[in-house]
Amino acid sequence: MSSSDAEEALCQIRDQVARLQHRYATPERLKALLDQTVGFDRALWQAAVEQGQPAIAVPEHAGGMGMGWPGLAALMEEVGKAVVSLPLIATPVVAEALLASDDEAPAARYLAPLVSGELIACVAFAEPGQTSPLQRPELACSGDTLNGSKAAAAFAAVADLALVHADADGASQLMLVPLDQPGVTRRTQPGLDNARAHAALQFRDAKAYPLLRGDAAIGKIMARVALATAFEQIGGASACLACARGYALERKAFGQPIGRFQAIKHKLVDMYWRIEIARGCALDALDALEGGNPLWPALAAAARLAAIEAYDFAARENIQTHGAMGVTWEAMPHHYYRRARCLALELGSTQAWREYLLAEAGFDAAAA
Amino acid sequence: MDFSLDPADEAFRDEVRQFLREKLPADIAERSRRGYHPLLADVQAWTRIVYDHGWPGPNWPAEWGGCGWTHLRQFIFEEECALAGAPQLDVASFRMFGPLIMTFGSDALKNRYRDPILRGETCWGQGFSEPNAGSDLGALTTRAVREGDEYVINGRKIWTTNAHVANVLCVLARTNPESRRGFSMIIVDPKAPGVTIRPIIDIGEGHSLNETIFEDVRTPVDNLIGEEGQGWHYAKSLLDNERASSAEIPANKFNLMKLRQMAQRKRGDGTRLIDDPGFAARLARLEIDLQALEFLTLRALTEKAGGTRLPVGSLLKVRGSELFQKTGEMQLEALGDYVSYAYPPPEQSPHGIAAWPPGPAFAPGVVADFMYRRATTIYGGANEVQRQIIARSFLEL
Amino acid sequence: MSSASALLEPRTAVPAEDALERYRLDARAWLAEHAPRFSGAVRRGLPLERDVALGRAWQALKAAHGYGAITLPKRYGGGGGTELQKIVFTEEELRYDLPVAYFSISLSNPVPIFLRHAPETFRQRLGPPAIRGEHIWCQLFSEPAAGSDLAALRLRAERQGDGWVLNGQKLWTSWAQIAQWGVIVTRTDPDVPKHAGLTYFFLDMRSPGISVRPIRRLVGHPDLNEVYFDNVYVPDEQRLGEVGGGFRVAIETLMIERYGITDETASSPALEALVELARRARLNGRPALADGEVRAAIARAYVERQGLRSIQKRAMEAIAAGREPGPEGAIRKLLLGRMRQQLGALALDLMGADGIRLDPQGESSRDFAHAWLDPSVRIAGGTDEVLLNTLAERVLGLPQDHRPDKGVPFRQLES
Ligand SMILES: Cc1cc2nc3c(=O)[nH]c(=O)nc-3n(C[C@H](O)[C@H](O)[C@H](O)COP(=O)(O)OP(=O)(O)OC[C@H]3O[C@@H](n4cnc5c(N)ncnc54)[C@H](O)[C@@H]3O)c2cc1C
Ligand SMILES: Cc1cc2nc3c(=O)[nH]c(=O)nc-3n(C[C@H](O)[C@H](O)[C@H](O)COP(=O)(O)OP(=O)(O)OC[C@H]3O[C@@H](n4cnc5c(N)ncnc54)[C@H](O)[C@@H]3O)c2cc1C
C-alpha cells in the first residue's frame, strides 16, 4: 500500500468506527453496562465484527486486512474516545503469536475463527498479589498442562481463548488456553468498571497450547498490548479534553464562561500537553515497531507511562471542571474516570512499566 | 509553640479513650475500619451515646449548653474518636446550622433546636446551590416573598445533601429583589406542601444528593434566621465553618494511619510497599502535610477565638481536601489488583458485614472512596474558587 | 555506542529525504573541520570582547560558506536555504560549544524582519554586514512597565521634521552593549487604545542620546541591559510598517522563529548526565540510581523528552512536505524550561553538600548548578503563564481573560 492509500484506509476506519459508536455508545447503553457484573455489549461486538474490526491488524496472508499496528492504533483511539470496550487488541496479538509458533496445529484451529470474530480472545498476564505482570509468573506449566491462577483480566468473562504466560521449569512460556474446558474456572466480581467484562481465571490441570518461550518474547507481547492500549488511552483523554472544553465554554459563573478563568484555562492546557506528549511517544513507538527498530519496546513503555498519566489527569480534571455535575451518575465524566484507572491497572502499574522502560532503554545495563 | 500536653489534658485523653473502649458500638467501629462512611443512623445513635455519657456537644461552648471544653480538649476528643473509628458528630448540626442559630437566631429558634441538636436528632439540608448558582452563589434566583406572617418560597435548589432524610431545610433565598445581595436564610419543613425532593444519583451510584424544588411553599416568618437581608453575611460565616471542618484532620489522620498499615502489609510476592523508597518518600510527604495542616487548624481555632476576619476555612479546605485525595490515591496504589473489585456498602450487600468480598479488610472503603473522593475538591466551594478567595484575602491580590 | 546512547541521539532525520541527509553530512564534515578552532578549550577564560571577536570570525566563516543565515536571501549574504536545512545545521552545530550566543537574537528576529520591511537601499547596505557578523542587532521591546503585556509600552516617539524623537527607557535588551543596530517599538499616539498607537523603527545604536547600562544577572551572564533614550533622533525612512502599525510588526518579529529549535535540554546537561550522576551518588549504601524516587524522575524526564522529540520530528516532516506543522510544537518551551529546573534541583540533591558549590567558570549546558540557578528559559520569549494562556486561546479556543484595558485610550491607562 502506498502511504496515501494507507492514510485513506485509516481515515475510513475512523469514519466507520465513529458511525458505529454513534449508534451504540449512547449514555443509556454505557450506563447499563456498568450496572451488570459482566458488562459486555454483544450487539456492538457483532457490529464491529461485521465491519471486520478484529481482522484489521492481522496480516493478509493470515486472512486479515493487513493494516498492521497503525490500523489497530487508529481503531483503538476511536474506541477510547467513545469509552466503549471491545476485545480488539488480543486478536492480533494472539494471531502474531500463533504465526510465530513452531506448532501449526493451534494456528490451523483458531486463526480463522479469531480473525472472523467468531471467537473472542483475551490477554491475562497479571497474577493475584503480584505487583508487575512483567515478572516471572507463578502459574505453573508442565508440557501442555496449566495449574494456578491469573488475576482479573479484561474480557476474560466473555472470551473463548486466553493468552497467558506461565513458568515452565524456570523459563517463561506463552500459552494459549481454550477457556471452555473443565479445568478452567472464571470468577467474576463487580468492579470499578464493569464494562470491561473482567474475570479472574483459575486453572486446574487445564490444557493449553505452548506458543513462544522466553522472558524477552513475552515482554514484547506485553509491549504490543501496551502500545495499542496507549492509543485507547489517548483517545479517552482527548475525549475528556473535548468534554471539559465544551463545558467550559457553555457553563457560566460570575457573568462569564468558566473557560475564561485561568484556573480552568490552564487546567485544560495541562491536559492538552500531557495528551500531546503521550501521542508523540505512541506515534514514535509505532514507527519504531513498524520500522523494526530494536528499541521499540522502550518506546512502547514510554508511551504507556505517558498515556496513563494523560488519561488519569484528564479524567480527573474533567470531573473537576464540571463542578458538582461531574460527580453525578447521569453525566459522562465518570465513565472516563473509571476507564482511565482500569486501563492503567490492567497491564501492570506505572511502577512496573517504569522499571521495564529503564531496563529496555539501557539505563540499568550501563550501570554494570 | 509547645505542643506537649499538661497532665490534666493527658488525663482527659485517657478518660476519652476509656469511654470509647466501653461505649463505642462494635459494628460502628467495624464499619469505619472497613473504610466506609458512617450511616446517618450511626451518627445519630453515637451522638446520643455521647450525650447520655454527660458530654452534650463536645465542640460547643457552655453558654450554648455544650461541654465548654477548651479547643485543645475538643481536638483531643475528635482525634481519639477518629482513631477509634467513631463517627464524627454531624458537621451540619454542630458546626454549621447549630452555631448559626445559636449566634444569630431568635430565642424561639434557639430553644427549638438546641436540645435536639445536642441529642443528635436533627438532620439539616443546606439549600444554597442552584442550577445556575454554584461557585457564583450570588446568582441564585430562589425568591421568598413575605405575605402576612408567612414567607412564600419559589425556586429550585440542587445538590442538597441529605434533603431526602432531613428534618430541617435551610434555604438561602432572595427577599429583596432590588439589592444585589438581598438574601435571607429561612428554615423550611421538608414535609411542607410544595416541597419536592428528587434524588440525584452520584458517580458511585449512591444517593445523598438531591434536587429540591419549592413551589409556593409557606413557612412562618418566625423561621427567619437573624435579620432579613443578612443572609449573605450568615452564609459566608457558615460556609467558612463548613470549609474549616472540611480540613477533616481526624479523618485525614485515620486515613493516613490506614495507608501506613496497608503499605506495611506483606504482599503475595513477599515484598512490602513501604520498602519502595519512592513510595515511602511520598508517604512521608503526606505525613508532613498532615502535620502542617494540623498545626494550621489549631492555630486557626485559637485565632478564631480572637476574632480573625480572614477566611481560614478556605485555606484549610484546599489543603485538607487535597490531602484527602492524595491519601486515597496512594491507598488505591497500595491495594494493588484488589482495586478492580467493587465493594457494595454493607447495608446493600445480601451478606451484610460478615461476608466480605476478596481482598484485605480495608479494601472495600478504599475502593468506594475512589469515586466519592472527587467530590471533596468541589463541595463547600470548588478549590479553584477557594484559591481566588485566599489570594484576595490573605495576599490582598 | 551502547544501545541507550543510540536511542538518545536526536532523531529528527527525515528518512526518504536523501538530499537533506546529504546536507547534514556535508555540514557535519564542514563543522568537524572548522569548529574546533572556535570552540571548547579555545574559549575558556576569554574576556567578553575577545569571545565576541571570536564569534564574529566564526559568523563570517559560516557566512562565506552559506551557513551564516541559512534561510535569508542570498542577495544579502544569506544561504537562500530552507527551514529544515537551518534546523539540521543548528542541530549539528550545537554539538560544539561555539560563540554563537551573540547572534542568536540578531539573526533570528531583528535582521529577518528588517530584511522583510526596510527600503531596499538599507537592506543592501546593512544586510550583508549583519549576516557576516560585523553588525549585531538588538531587539528593544520590553520596558519596566511592559513585558508580557508588550502593548503597554511607554517609550515615546514624537514627530520632528522628517523624523522622530525618542524619549524613554527599554529594559532587558540582550546584547545592547555590543549592538550596532536595533529594532524598537515606540508609542506614537497615546490617545488611541494601546495596541493601536505603536510604531516600529530600526535605529543606529550609536545615535546621540542612547545610553546603555548593564544589568547584573543571577549568574555571570553579561547579556542584559537597560537602554535609555534621551531625545534620540530617528529618520522616518527607518520606520518599518505603518505609523500606528507597530504592534503587528512586533508580533510578526516574534513569530519568525516559530519552529526554531532550542536544543532539547534548554541548554542544561542532558538526562544521561543525570543518570551518570545518580549512578555514582550513594543513597542508603546503594547507588542513587536504585532509588525509586530518582528512578521515577528519570523515567518521567525520559518520557517527556521522547514525546517532544516525536513532536519535533513530525513538525519537520510537515515542513518538508510543505504542510503547516501542528500547534503542539508550542508546548516545547513550556516543558523544557520546567524540566531544566526540576532536573537541576534533583542533580544538586544527589551531589549532597557539594551541590552548594558554584563553579564561576561553569556553564548551564555542562553544569547542573548553573542550569538550576538560571530559570530565564521560563521567562524570556513569553513566560510560562502567558504561554499557557496563548495555548488555551489559540489551540483550545477558550475565551480571552477579562481585559479591563480593552478599547480604552492609552492615556487613561497610564495613571
Ligand atoms: C457531594 C456534594 C455535596 C454538596 N452538597 C451541597 C449542599 O448540601 N447544599 C448546597 O447548597 N450545595 C451543595 N453542593 C454544591 C456545591 O456547593 C457546588 O457544587 C460548588 O459550590 C460548585 O458549584 P458548581 O457545582 O455549580 O460548579 P461551577 O460553579 O459550575 O464550577 C465549575 C468549575 O468552574 C470553576 N470555577 C467557577 N468559578 C470560578 C472562578 N471564579 N475562578 C476559577 N474557577 C472557577 C470551578 O472551580 C469548577 O471547577 C454539593 C456539591 C457536592 C459535589
Ligand atoms: C534572559 C532574558 C533575555 C531577554 N531579552 C530581551 C530582549 O532582548 N529584548 C526584549 O525586548 N526583551 C527581552 N527580555 C524580556 C522578556 O521578553 C520579558 O521578561 C518577558 O516578556 C516577561 O516580561 P516581564 O519580565 O516584564 O514580566 P511581567 O510581564 O511583569 O510578568 C510577571 C509575572 O506575571 C505573569 N503574568 C503576566 N501577564 C500574565 C497574564 N496575562 N496571565 C497570567 N500571568 C501573567 C508572568 O507570567 C510573570 O510570572 C528578556 C528576558 C530575559 C529573562
Image: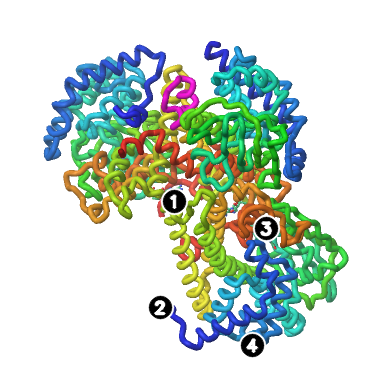
Cα separation between marks 3 and 2: 44 Å
To which residue does mark 2 refer?
B1
Along the line of sight, which residue is nearer the eye, A77 or B22?
B22
Cα separation between marks 4 and 2: 29 Å
Q: Is B86 part of what is drawn in magenta?
A: no
- Identify the residue at image location x=48%, y=42%: A352
To which residue does mark 4 refer?
B63
Looking at the rendered structure, the kind of residue marked 1 is: Leu
* Residue B139 disc label: 3
Chain to which the residue tagged by mark 4 belongs: B
Q: Is residue B277 above or below residue C326?
A: below
Q: Are marks 4 and 2 on the same chain?
A: yes
- Dot 3 falls on a residue whose secondary structure is helix
Looking at the rendered structure, the kind of residue marked 4 is: Glu
Looking at the rendered structure, the kind of residue marked 3 is: Ala
User: Is B131 left or right of A216, judged from the image as shown?
Assistant: right
Quadrant where the image shows the C terminus of chain A:
top left
To which residue does mark 1 refer?
C413
> Is label 4 within 8 A of ligand 1 (CB to nearest ligand atom)?
no
Along the line of sight, which residue is nearer the eye, C109 or B267?
B267
Looking at the rendered structure, the kind of residue marked 2 is: Met
Q: Is residue B109 above or below residue C222?
A: below
- Dot 2 falls on a residue whose secondary structure is loop
Chain to which the residue tagged by mark 1 belongs: C
Residue B388 visible in the current orientation:
no
Residue A226 drawn at (x, y percent): 54, 33
Mark 2: give few (<14), some (14-19) or many (20+) Cα within 10 Å.
Answer: few
Q: Magenta stretch?
A: A284-300
